[in-house]
């Protein structure tokens, strides 16, 4: 709202100060000439005496001669006046724009508005995070309810581990993945999920345990999605954009149903842009 007001104020100043005053003066001159001619014709229609006719003709001729043969010095003075008037108008516009703007920004009210906007957006982010967290909590509760009915359902334990990981509850995610491992054994996708959880538990660090799990998973399944995704993420974080793009491309070419193709394409493009900028 503040910027709209300043823009309107600036537009109003420009319109008022740049009115075509020289054109108005020229119109006045032409209007006077037209009136002189009309008055002369009116007097001539009344058939005045010859002496009066000569006098009127002489006056009209003098007026025409005055307007058509004004001295060049006078024209130069007018041109100089117009240039001075233009510079004056521009300076006045700048002052009328800068002074109110600086004054407004110096007011405590502007700082209060900025603080209020920051507080508003911070509140919106908190509300969004709370909404997402609540959704994750609801999802976790639903999976837990299913596991109470069937504790030996390995896929539900995997889903629970992923839900905990999405909710930044790494320790609970490890417990869920360990339960799935006990039921399924060392399946490649289970090992990849465990490696991801241990990676985040170590503060996004490729520990020996994480590398061992990845090696074991990819030996059994060279295109296991969770393992490749973790390798690509680590490469991107370390600035190895070529390796990250190649790994994501490998995931894309695998045509696995659990792969989000649009997201992978965006990540590949982002890595290629980063690589070109280096």
Image (tube, grey):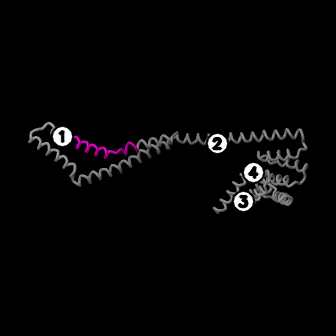
- Secondary structure under the numbered disc 4 in the rendered image: loop
Earlier sequence position, callout 1 versus callout 3: 1
Q: Which comes sooner in the sequence, label 4 or label 1?
A: 1
Residue 122: numbered disc: 2
Inspect this view and state whether residue 165 appears: yes
Crowdedness near tag 1: few (<14), some (14–19) or many (≥20) residues, C-alpha within 10 Å: few
User: Quick check: can you spot residue 234?
Assistant: no
Question: Label 4 belongs to which residue?
Answer: 260
Tag 3's secondary structure?
Answer: helix
Across and down, in percent, residue 269 comes to 68, 57
The residue range painted magenta reads 14-36
Question: Are the two marked residues, 3 and 4, in contact with CB atoms closer than 8 angstroms?
Answer: no
Mark 2 in CB contact with mark 4 (< 8 angstroms): no
Q: Is residue 194 magenta?
A: no
**Image-based side of 239 in relation to 37, left or right:** right
Nearer the observer, disc 1 or disc 3? 1
Instruction: Please identify, in this view, whether the residue under mark 2 or under mark 1 is nearer the observer.
Output: 1
Q: Residues within 10 Å of mark 3 (few under 14, many from 20)?
A: many
Label 4 environment density (alpha carbons within 10 Å; few <14, some 14–19, many ≥20) = few
Majority SS type along the magenta span: helix
Which residue is located at x 25 percent, y 42 percent?
Answer: 31
Q: CA distance from mark 4 to mark 1?
A: 91 Å
Q: CA distance from mark 1 to mark 3?
A: 91 Å
| Residues marked 2 and 3 touching at CB (< 8 Å) | no
**Which residue is identified by label 1?**
41
Residue furthest toward the top?
Answer: 46
Q: Which residue is mark 3?
A: 245
**Circle 2 residues within 10 Å: few <14, some 14–19, many ≥20:** few
Residue 60 against residue 209 in the figure, above or below: above
Q: Quadrant of residue 33?
A: top left
């Amino acid at each position: 709202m503040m910027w709209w007001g300043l823009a309107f104020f600036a537009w109003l100043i420009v319109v008022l100060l740049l009115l075509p005053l020289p054109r108005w003066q020229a119109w006045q001159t032409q209007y006077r000439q037209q009136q002189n001619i009309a008055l002369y014709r009116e007097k001539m229609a009344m058939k005045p005496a010859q002496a009066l006719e000569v006098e009127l003709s002489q006056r009209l001729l003098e007026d025409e001669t005055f307007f058509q043969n004004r001295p060049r010095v006078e024209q130069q003075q007018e041109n100089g006046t117009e240039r001075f008037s233009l510079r004056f108008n521009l300076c006045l516009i700048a002052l009328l724009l800068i002074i109110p703007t600086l004054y407004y920004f110096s007011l405590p009210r502007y700082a209060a508005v900025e603080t209020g906007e920051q507080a508003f957006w911070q509140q919106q982010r908190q509300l969004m995070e709370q909404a997402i967290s609540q959704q994750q909590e609801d999802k976790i509760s639903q999976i837990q309810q299913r596991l109470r009915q069937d504790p030996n359902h390995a896929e539900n334990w995997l889903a629970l581990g992923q839900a905990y990981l999405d909710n930044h509850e790494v320790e609970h995610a490890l417990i869920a993945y360990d339960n799935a491992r006990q039921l399924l054994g060392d399946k490649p996708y289970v090992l990849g999920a465990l490696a991801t959880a241990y990676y985040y538990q170590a503060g996004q660090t490729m520990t020996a345990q994480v590398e061992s799990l990845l090696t074991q998973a990819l030996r059994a399944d060279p295109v296991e999605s969770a393992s490749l995704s973790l390798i690509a993420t680590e490469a991107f974080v370390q600035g190895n954009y070529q390796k990250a793009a190649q790994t994501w491309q490998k995931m894309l070419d695998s045509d696995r149903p659990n792969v989000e193709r649009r997201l992978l394409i965006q990540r590949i493009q982002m890595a290629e842009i980063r690589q070109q900028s280096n």
